[in-house]
Image (cartoon, rainbow, N blue to C red):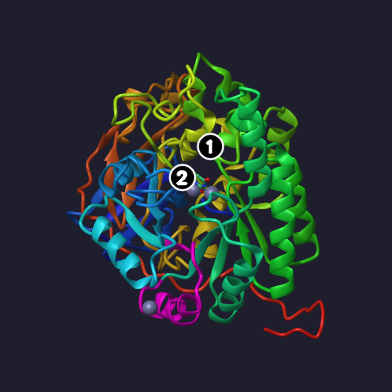
């Protein structure tokens, strides 16, 4: 066979198997052979992976870049990573495909200009391959009946995200049903941010009256029941409508149990969790006077290790289909000179309600789970591949991504053989994002990708980004490859 590149002698890991001393042959950016001792013609590029794990390139299906909407409650947004800096950071952490968000504002009457706008932001700017989800904040009849089919057929976008909280974004249950009704017909996967908006608003008002405004009271305002109630409610709406949903960024044991129970009843309910819920707890929000603001995200980091253990269990037992970063970065030093969330507070240390909700993490996602999950013995290498690459690609219809086998894109991440790797403590200076802090500062890493390869081309090598901005391509997606509607009904109602 004729190859352009051969990756030699790696320990190749898929979602089901591990093959030692295995070669991967690549032609025109596609994997064409996997097996021992592939024969190289003269001039073939060989990459030595002796003793190293070779995994499918990471597929991060929850990344916010250059987002223009109000992710931050009631404020203009400052998502500080662009397609340039965000995807540079992605490849430096072993990720080869990201799905980012094109976000409708409530005033937008059509999704077409919204999608076109995000295409402009991304085009020629990405180091890795990318696709879009659309955030729907105003599902008018025109949008769900006219723009949704266009989105699927013309733009290759087969998933939407809905919010149950945040004033500029949230949908009522009625509107969620409008979206689900259309999504079911078109084979769209609906992602849901499930938190009870009224509890959050009520708690925030009452905490402020008691001057409980420091960053960690972000967590006080949103105890696990806030997530659990909304999760249970939206699972009910999805059951009524017989349509698949994914609960994004699940943080607590209660919500995990609702998802698990729904799956046990064979509903097409999927779950996503994120590194911050496995590796951080609410005490991170209590640091310094206001420094805890660096760790404010929604749902919040949980107080209790019981929740963290439930999230680990959910990864192991298959409740969580995907493990994503939810990279939603804002800078600690705000453009107006004040720090994250301080700029609107008239109290000495500001108010948690003005702290942007979200953390940077696209670069640390894979190394955290590889080091803290695989190398610590908590999960198998196959489980790592399943939740970081294979499932995300299948759930969102990325047909040529997320696996190692003939016909798949040659997107690979190669991990140091452990005996050659000196563990280190992370500092923000090591990262490639445009953000001035990391919530994972000081955590010890036992490993890091040595190479990131996209469609046969090395884009990250020995700590250096060697790929080019603009190499990343937009990927049109097909429908989900995981189970969808079941044709099981709660009444005579049929959509
Ligand atoms: N939800 C997200 O998905 N990302 C950041 C903030 C949020 O609430
Ligand atoms: Zn339209
Ligand atoms: Zn969210
Ligand atoms: Zn997000």
Left or right: 163 with respect to 291?
right
Q: Nearer the viewer, residue 68 or 239?
A: 68
Tell me if residue 60 can be seen: no
Image quadrant in which you'd find residue 225: top right
Image quadrant holding the N terminus, namely bottom left
Residue drawn at the location 45% of the way across and 47% of the way down: 71
Of tags 1 and 2, the one toward the viewer is 2
Pointers 1 and 2 in contact (C-beta within 8 Å)? no
Image quadrant holding the C terminus, namely bottom right
Residue drawn at the location 44% of the way across and 19% of the way down: 425
Q: Earlier in the sequence, mark 1 or mark 2?
A: 2
Q: Nearer the viewer, residue 276 or 48?
A: 276
Left or right: 386 with respect to 243?
left
Q: Is residue 464 magenta?
A: no
Q: Position of residue 14 (x, y in %)?
A: 53, 53
In the depicted structure, whether residue 433 falls above or below residue 404:
above
Residue where numbered disc 2 is placed: 74
Q: Position of residue 426 (x, y in %)?
A: 42, 22
Q: Is residue 149 magenta?
A: yes
* Cα gap from disc 1 to disc 2, whole angstroms: 15 Å
Q: Residues within 10 Å of mark 2 (few under 14, many from 20)?
A: some
Start-end of magenta stretch: 133-156
Q: Mark 2 near ligand 1 (CB under 8 Å)?
A: no
Q: Mark 1 near ligand 1 (CB under 8 Å)?
A: yes
Farthest residue to the left: give it: 43
Residue drawn at the location 61% of the way across and 59% of the way down: 246
Residue where numbered disc 1 is placed: 297
């Amino acid at each position: 066979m004729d190859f352009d590149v051969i990756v030699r002698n790696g320990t190749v890991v898929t979602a089901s198997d591990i093959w030692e001393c295995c070669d991967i042959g690549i032609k025109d950016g596609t994997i064409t052979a996997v097996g021992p001792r592939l024969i190289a013609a003269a001039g073939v590029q060989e990459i030595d992976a002796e003793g190293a794990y070779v995994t499918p390139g990471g597929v991060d299906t929850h990344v916010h870049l250059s987002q223009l909407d109000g992710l931050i409650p009631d404020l203009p947004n400052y998502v500080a990573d662009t397609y340039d800096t965000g995807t540079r950071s992605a490849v430096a952490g072993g990720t080869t495909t990201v799905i980012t968000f094109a976000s409708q504002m409530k005033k937008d009457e059509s999704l077409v200009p919204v999608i076109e706008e995000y295409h402009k932001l991304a085009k020629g700017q990405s180091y890795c391959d990318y696709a879009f989800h659309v955030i729907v904040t105003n599902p008018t009849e025109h949008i769900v009946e006219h723009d949704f089919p266009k989105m699927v057929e013309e733009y290759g976008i087969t998933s939407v995200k809905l919010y149950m909280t945040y004033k500029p974004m949230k949908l009522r249950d009625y509107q969620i049903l409008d979206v689900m009704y259309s999504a079911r017909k078109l084979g769209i996967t609906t992602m849901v941010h499930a938190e009870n908006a009224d509890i959050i608003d009520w708690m925030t008002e009452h905490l402020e009256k008691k001057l409980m405004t420091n960053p960690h009271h972000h967590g006080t305002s949103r105890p696990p029941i806030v997530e659990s109630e909304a999760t249970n409610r939206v699972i009910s709406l999805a059951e009524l409508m017989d349509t698949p949903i994914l609960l994004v960024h699940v943080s607590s044991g209660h919500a995990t149990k609702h998802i698990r129970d729904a799956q046990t009843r064979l509903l097409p309910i999927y779950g996503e969790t994120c590194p911050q819920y496995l590796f951080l707890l609410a005490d991170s929000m209590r640091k310094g006077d206001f420094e805890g603001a660096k760790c404010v995200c929604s749902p919040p980091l949980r107080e209790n290790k019981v929740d963290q253990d439930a999230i680990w269990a959910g990864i192991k037992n298959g409740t969580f289909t995907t493990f994503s970063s939810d990279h939603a970065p804002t800078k600690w030093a705000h453009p107006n000179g004040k720090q994250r969330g301080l700029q609107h507070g008239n109290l000495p240390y500001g108010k948690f309600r003005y702290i942007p909700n979200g953390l940077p993490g696209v670069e640390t996602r894979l190394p955290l789970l590889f080091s803290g999950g695989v190398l610590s013995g908590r999960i198998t290498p196959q489980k790592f591949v399943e939740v970081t690459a294979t499932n995300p690609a299948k759930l969102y219809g990325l047909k040529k991504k997320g696996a190692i086998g003939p016909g798949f894109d040659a997107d690979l991440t190669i991990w140091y053989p452990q005996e050659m790797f000196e563990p280190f403590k992370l500092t923000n200076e090591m990262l490639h994002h445009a953000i001035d802090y990391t919530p994972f500062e000081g955590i010890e890493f036992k490993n890091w990708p040595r190479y990131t390869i996209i469609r046969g081309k090395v884009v990250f090598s020995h700590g250096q980004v060697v790929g080019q901005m603009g190499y990343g391509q937009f990927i049109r997606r097909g429908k989900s490859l995981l189970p969808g509607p079941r044709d099981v009904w709660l009444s005579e109602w049929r959509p």
